[in-house]
Image (tube, rainbow, N blue to C red):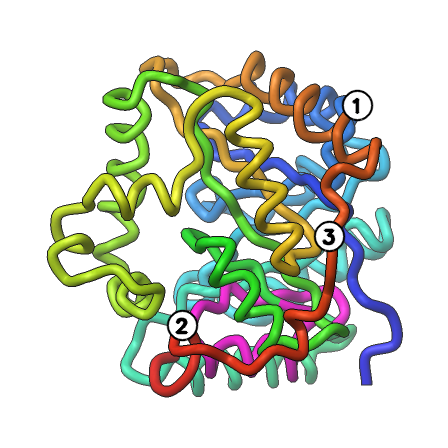
Amino acid sequence: MRVTKLDLGPIGVTLNYGDWEALLDAAPELEELGYSTIWVSGGQIDDLGRIADVVRATRKVPVATGIIPVDVFPSDAVAEAYAEIEGTHPGRFVVGLGGAHGPKPLQTLGGYLDRLDEAKPRVPEARRVLAALGPRMLDLARDRTAGACPLLVTPEYAAQARALLGGDSMLAVQQCVVLDTDATRAREAARELIGFLGGVTGYPAHLRRMGFGEDEVTQLSDRLVDALVAWGDEDTINARVSEHLEAGADHVAVTVLNTTGSSGPPLEQWRQLANALITRADRGSHSPRSRQRVRAPLDPLLRGGGR
């Protein structure tokens, strides 16, 4: 039984740009800005040593992976990386896992978690989370890890995921944002990401379960894009983050998408969002109004089949 719920704070940020050295240089400022967790995106994890790089570059902030693909990195390599970081910086590394895209993803992830349990030292349930989307994956996240870290979800999905996870599991929503009021530029950036993930096993079914039609999924309709990616000014993005927290998410990790064409980190956008999101979180404006939805029955969003 889980004793203490994993606490990642309310607002995190994702390192998801290509210049790794520039990202490392930016990490200490992100911590100073008040982001409560720094996430390293899967696209950056070509080497597990990058996680330790971010831990060493910062002082106290948790560093989570979003995500380590289990079909790329063997469990013993993840256990070794966790043990090394835990030995020098205890409590800093949160192991986010996912990417089981074979014919039996539940069995693949279950076996992977078994091996992490058997590792010496083991990777404890309280320090690992799953990129779960469907109901069976959320069950696995609830039963075998500290919680779930889904990407491309709506606040309505967050409410239903919270109902399935229960109150003791952590729900960290990864919210993609575009700090740009130009609809064409913003949606173009959003479609690039959604189109890429739409080719990954599991995501098309996930989008249909959230109520989007087949044509909307294949054509990446404006309605789908606007529901999944928050774009506009700081107030608009703040409103979406608040909706997730009010729906039952414990944490929202903000992933800034690029509309400038620059390959460098979006430092100015991170600063603007910190001022808008974290300042308001400190004032309590992001506090959930109610947790009654935890006990609400599941609607068709997450009921029935699908992993």
Residue 32 got which mark? 1
Left or right, 306 with reference to 98: left
Is 225 or 108 nearer to us in this picture? 225
Give coordinates of residue 8: x percent, y percent.
Answer: 75, 50
What amino acid type is highlighted by mark number 1? Glu
What amino acid type is highlighted by mark number 2? Leu
Say if 31 sits above or below 286 in the image.
above
Left or right, 246 with reference to 225: right
Residue 32, by quadrant, is top right
Q: Is residue 145 magenta?
A: yes
Task: Single out the mark in the foreground, 2 or 1.
Answer: 2
Which class describes the residues within 10 Å of circle 3: few (<14), some (14-19), or many (20+)? some
Q: Which residue is mark 2?
A: 301
- The region drawn magenta spans 126-147
Label 2 and label 1: CA atoms lie apart by 38 Å
Q: Secondary structure at mark 1?
A: helix
Q: Is residue 195 magenta?
A: no
Residue drawn at x 59%, y 32% as measured from the top left: 238
Residue 288 got which mark? 3
Label 2 and label 3: CA atoms lie apart by 21 Å
Answer whether labels 2 and 3 touch (C-beta < 8 Å). Answer: no
Image quadrant containing the C terminus: bottom left
Which class describes the residues within 10 Å of circle 2: few (<14), some (14-19), or many (20+)? some
Left or right, 198 with reference to 78: left
Residue drawn at x 19%, y 61% as measured from the top left: 213
Q: Earlier in the sequence, mark 2 or mark 3?
A: 3
Left or right, 167 with reference to 141: right
Residue 182, by quadrant, is top left
* Residue 77 at least partly seen: no
